[in-house]
Image (cartoon, rainbow, N blue to C red):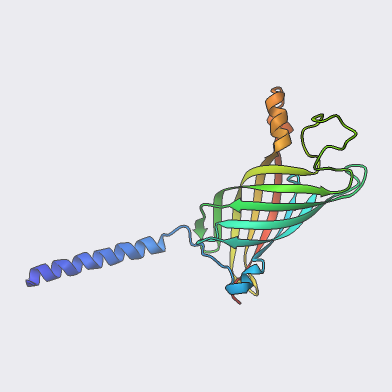
Amino acid sequence: MLPGVAAAAQRVDGDDAAIADCVIRRQWDVRRDEGYDGWLRLLPTRASIQYAGGMGMFSVGAGWEYGRRGEWATDLFVGFVPASCIDRTYVTATVKQSYVPWSIRCVDRFSIEPFKCGIYLNSVIADEFWLREPSRYPKGYYGFSTKVRAHIFIGQNFRLHLHRCGALRDISLFWEANTCDLYLISRITNRYLSPGDYIGLSVGIEFHILGEL
């Protein structure tokens, strides 16, 4: 190779390396799968506390994050509705599926996850709620279950990176707007309802646990 050509090739290689390094340093989404290996994947990788959301006044849960960047999560919650809100205290159970497609690293220790979405199924643990209409009602009188509600939600996360603090790696604050199947049916059949009648808000905190200690 001629000396001039060789020098030009080196400059190109150097420029490509500089560009690649710049892209790496400016990468916004630095998430990765923090799960365990093998059977240890059955262990939860996060714990959550949520206020409101159709799951009870307060709910606590444990969940699993997975996917190439940990963008998927499945959580199991137990919540309660205090007697001060209705006639007696009720316990609820919820399974929740979340998807967070993007994470934007703002500074070294803080990221914003500008969009999250998902679904969850919630049930009240009490005998007076039913999956099928009791025989005392005419067939099709209600046409829905009073025991299980299906919800959809959207929201945002604000994540603080701890760079390993014992078993804790990150803490996230989040908010969500949600609605359920029954509320959507009511909105379709009663167009006078305002968004506040069928859309609820919830807030919470998530503690992300290290998959490898």
- Relative to 82, does residue 196 appear above or below in the rendering? above
| Residue 56 in view | no
Residue most toward the left?
2
Q: Where residue 124 appears, x then y in whole percent?
A: 82, 48
Is the N terminus in the top left, top right, bottom left or bottom right quadrant? bottom left
Residue most toward the bottom?
213
The structure residue drawn at horizontal position 64% and vertical position 66%, both measured from the top left corner, is: 45
Q: Nearer the viewer, residue 161 or 143?
A: 143
Q: Where residue 140 appears, x then y in whole percent?
A: 79, 30
Q: Nearer the viewer, residue 3 or 188?
A: 188
| Residue 22 in view | yes
Q: Nearer the viewer, residue 20 or 43?
A: 43
Is the C terminus in the top left, top right, bottom left or bottom right quadrant? bottom right
Q: Where residue 20 appears, x then y in whole percent?
A: 33, 63
Residue most toward the right?
87
The structure residue drawn at horizontal position 29% and vertical position 67%, both measured from the top left corner, is: 17
The structure residue drawn at horizontal position 43% and vertical position 59%, both measured from the top left corner, is: 27
| Residue 36, quarter of the rendered image | bottom right
